[in-house]
Image (tube, rainbow, N blue to C red):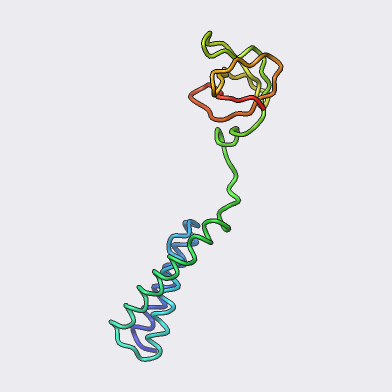
């Protein structure tokens, strides 16, 4: 086995190790390019051709497979902390009135200051949906 073939295998292993360490779909495309460079080396291509094959295959993989991978492989991320509260239902405990700066809602057993997303008055005992969180205030809309 030639020296360049061994180098391509070393690059491939290094890129796979980096990918496993980060799990961020960052180097996997270049690992595919390293395999293509290795194959070109085994077929007797010179170093310039091997490098061109590496870059072309890496870019093609990046362009055509990354959108699919990002959409379907990383789609099951669990929302954490504040992001997990957006879209949930809350119960209004005190009338929400943005002009009077009043309003309180209970979300997951905790009381929050609440404001209406569109300045409408929302009476107590209404179920609302959390649109966003600004500081320590829930910004809500009626269900």
Q: Decide which of 108, 5 is in the foreground and name it.
A: 108
Residue 51: give x, y in percent of width and height. 32, 78
Q: Residue 143's quadrant in the figure? A: top right
Residue 108 located left or right of residue 31: right
Instruction: Locate residue 26: give its quadrant.
Output: bottom left
Nearest to the observer: residue 51 or residue 94 = 94
Q: Residue at x 55, y 54 (%)?
A: 74
Looking at the image, which residue is at 54% across and 22% down?
118
102 w.r.t. 75: above or below: above
Q: Seen from this angle, which residue lies furthest top?
A: 100
Q: Quadrant of residue 44?
A: bottom left
Q: Position of residue 70 (x, y in %)?
A: 52, 57
x and y percentages locating residue 12 in the rendered image: 43, 73
Q: Quadrant of the N terminus?
A: bottom left
Q: Give the vertical position of 79 relative to 12 (above or below).
A: above
Left-right relation of 108 to 49? right
Q: Which of the two residues, 17 or 134, is positioned nearer the viewer here?
A: 134
Number of numbered discs: 0
User: Closer to the camera, 2 or 23?
Assistant: 23
Q: Residue at x 54, y 30 (%)?
A: 132
Q: In the displayed structure, does residue 91 sit left or right of residue 74?
A: right
Above or below, comparing residue 132 to residue 73 in the picture? above
Give percent across and percent down for residue 16: 47, 67
Question: Is residue 59 depicted above or below 92 in this figure?
Answer: below
Q: Say which residue appears at 63% left-offset and 28% top-offset.
A: 129
**Residue placed furthest toward the left:** 48
Q: In the current view of this chain or complex, which residue is farthest to the right?
A: 125
């Amino acid at each position: 086995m030639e020296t360049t073939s061994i180098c391509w295998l070393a690059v491939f292993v290094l890129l796979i190790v980096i990918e496993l360490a980060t799990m961020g779909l960052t180097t996997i495309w270049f690992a595919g390019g390293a395999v293509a460079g290795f194959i070109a080396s085994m077929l007797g291509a010179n170093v310039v051709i091997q490098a061109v094959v590496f870059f072309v295959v890496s870019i093609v993989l990046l362009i055509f497979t990354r959108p699919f991978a990002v959409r379907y492989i990383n789609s099951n991320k669990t929302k954490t902390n504040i992001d997990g509260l957006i879209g949930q239902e809350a119960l209004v405990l005190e009338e929400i009135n943005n002009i009077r700066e009043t309003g309180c809602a209970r979300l997951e057993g905790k009381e929050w200051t609440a404001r209406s997303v569109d300045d409408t008055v929302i009476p107590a005992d209404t179920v609302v949906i959390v649109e966003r969180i600004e500081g320590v205030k829930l910004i809500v809309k009626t269900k």
